[in-house]
Image: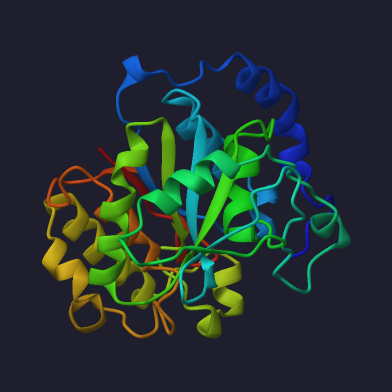
Amino acid sequence: MTPTSPAGAFDAFLPNALKRSAAQRTWTEADGALPALYLSHGAPPLFDDAEWIDQLFEWGQRFAKPKAILIVSAHWEHAPMMISGSAANTELVYDFGGFHPRYYQMLYPTPDSSELAQTVASLMPDGEELHQAPHRGLDHGAWVPLKIMYPLADVPVLQLSMPTSDPAKLMDIGRRLQPLREQGVLVLGSGFMTHGLPFLTREMMFGEVPAWSSDFDSWAAEALASGDTEALLDFRHKAPGMPYAHPTVEHFTPLFVTLGSAKDASVPVETTIDGYRVGFSKRSFQVA
């Protein structure tokens, strides 16, 4: 469905959100570790969904504004592991097609993140060099949700590539990143709880939720609520709805970076957003 006013919901949301974001208190050491997040990021049509916009913004308002953000997105798979360009105003990646020109004109000019880049590099194991793609900006799995959560673009953001689809290895990466949370850095995995894009139907566009999506979402919700990390690690074999829910797994696997950066991955998560968009689960959560 093509909106009559592309990003109209975002335009309506923005004036008040800018005021509230400007008044948001910035993180200090007294706040302790920030949570780590996994969010379903949608695509440009997220800017037309007033409810989802409000859910993401209010989530970001629940804790102090981060000093910086490190995000792993489904849309940057690259080995060896790399970080995005850290210069201020690095050009965004418009990695989507077939949408209204408005979405390709949206900007998110974040500040310099070179200090965060140096810190992330220091957390890598001895002998493992962290490469940088100096001209690569944030892809839509990063800038679309962050433009809503922190609309002033006043928080430095760095993107980390996802070098593997192995859940255990991604959890190890998350463990390396855990110290960042104590420094006021928001660690964020960005994907989509279900993402069977090849199986999208007209009925789903008008609100139908297929069983493969709802079954997978219910299974993941239960595993997350009970802290069953072992089941989640073996999602390819244990989750119902596969492989339809994730014909390719890159929208689910950022979840493991989030879980790895938790103080205790076996502790149940706090679900912050649920429901569906075009039949796909929006389930998002945070960990302490």
Q: Is residue 28 left or right of residue 228?
A: right
Look at the image and tell me in which quarter the C terminus lies.
Answer: top left
Front one among 24 and 85: 85
Q: Is residue 107 left or right of residue 281?
A: right
- Which picture quadrant has residue 126? bottom left
Q: Which residue is at 46% across, 75% downward? A: 80
Q: Which residue is at 13% across, 53% downward? A: 227
Q: Which residue is at 75% across, 73% downward? A: 97
Q: Is residue 155 above or below residue 70?
A: above
Q: Is residue 28 left or right of residue 42?
A: left
Front one among 82 and 234: 82
Number of marks in the image?
A: 0
Q: Is residue 210 above or below residue 140?
A: below
Residue 278, position as x, y percentages in the image: 55, 65
Looking at the image, can residue 50 be seen? no
Q: Is residue 33 left or right of residue 26?
A: left
Q: How is the image coloured?
A: rainbow
- Which picture quadrant has residue 251? bottom left
Residue 21, position as x, y percentages in the image: 62, 23
Front one among 63 and 184: 184
Residue 285, position as x, y percentages in the image: 34, 46
Look at the image and tell me in which quarter the N terminus lies.
Answer: bottom right
Residue 258, position as x, y percentages in the image: 33, 53
Looking at the image, can residue 228 be seen? yes
Q: Which residue is at 38% across, 54% downward? A: 283
Q: Is residue 180 above or below residue 203?
A: above
